[in-house]
């Protein structure tokens, strides 16, 4: 009886371990239109060669004013860019089932941060942005389409 319990736990753990790579292994898992928790926004992630890119498609502020500019950018020469369709994600490389080494631009503060995208299910990704390790914030994005 005591042998069966550890064996059952080992089989369950093996099943869970084998299921996680199935989610993470597909390089296109993160491709799509995603709802962000910040200001009810949406970001479209597409393949950019071997990498991923993401453009800001909408937010509460953009729905009120589609002509919003990148006024908080730290580079004054870029403050005239429109926020709609602005590339805010880039430089990611697929590594061990996650997209790493990328960056995310935050138009609210004009900062660009190191970022990682990790699949968390068929319709969910975790995006972690870091000022510097361990000062990071993780958001859960859900697939719109």
Image (spheres, rainbow, N blue to C red):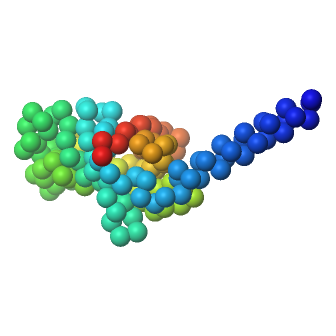
The structure residue drawn at horizontal position 53% and vertical position 53%, both measured from the top left corner, is: 24
Q: Nearer the viewer, residue 140 or 80?
A: 140
Residue 37: % across, % down: 33, 33
Residue 52 lies in quadrant: bottom left
Vertical position of residue 59 compared to residue 104: above or below = above
Residue 90: in sight, yes or no? no
Asked whether the viewer can see residue 94, the reply is: yes
Q: Residue furthest top?
A: 1
Please tell me which residue is depicted at 43% across the width and 41% down the height of the picture: 124
Image x and y of residue 34, in percent: 32, 44
Q: Say which quadrant the N terminus sits in.
A: top right
On the image, the x and y values in percent for residue 76 come to 16, 52
Establish if 119 lies above or below 59.
below
**Furthest-bottom residue in this view:** 49
User: In this rendering, would 102 be left or right of 97?
Assistant: left
> Which residue is drawn at the image coordinates 85% and 32% (left, top)?
5
Q: Where does the image place residue 18, in percent across and percent down from the top left?
A: 65, 50
Closer-to-camera residue (111/8): 8
């Amino acid at each position: 009886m005591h042998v069966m319990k550890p064996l059952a736990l080992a089989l369950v753990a093996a099943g869970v371990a084998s299921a996680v790579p199935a989610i993470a292994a597909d390089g296109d898992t993160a491709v799509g239109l995603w709802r962000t928790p910040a200001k009810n926004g949406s970001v479209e992630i597409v393949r950019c060669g071997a990498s991923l890119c993401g453009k800001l498609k909408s937010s509460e502020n953009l729905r009120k004013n589609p002509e919003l500019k990148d006024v908080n950018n730290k580079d004054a020469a870029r403050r005239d860019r429109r926020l709609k369709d602005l590339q805010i994600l880039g430089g990611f490389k697929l590594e061990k089932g996650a997209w790493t080494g990328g960056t995310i631009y935050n138009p609210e503060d004009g900062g660009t941060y190191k970022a990682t995208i990790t699949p968390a299910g068929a319709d969910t990704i975790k995006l972690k942005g870091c000022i510097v390790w361990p000062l990071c914030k993780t958001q859960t994005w859900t697939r719109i389409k």
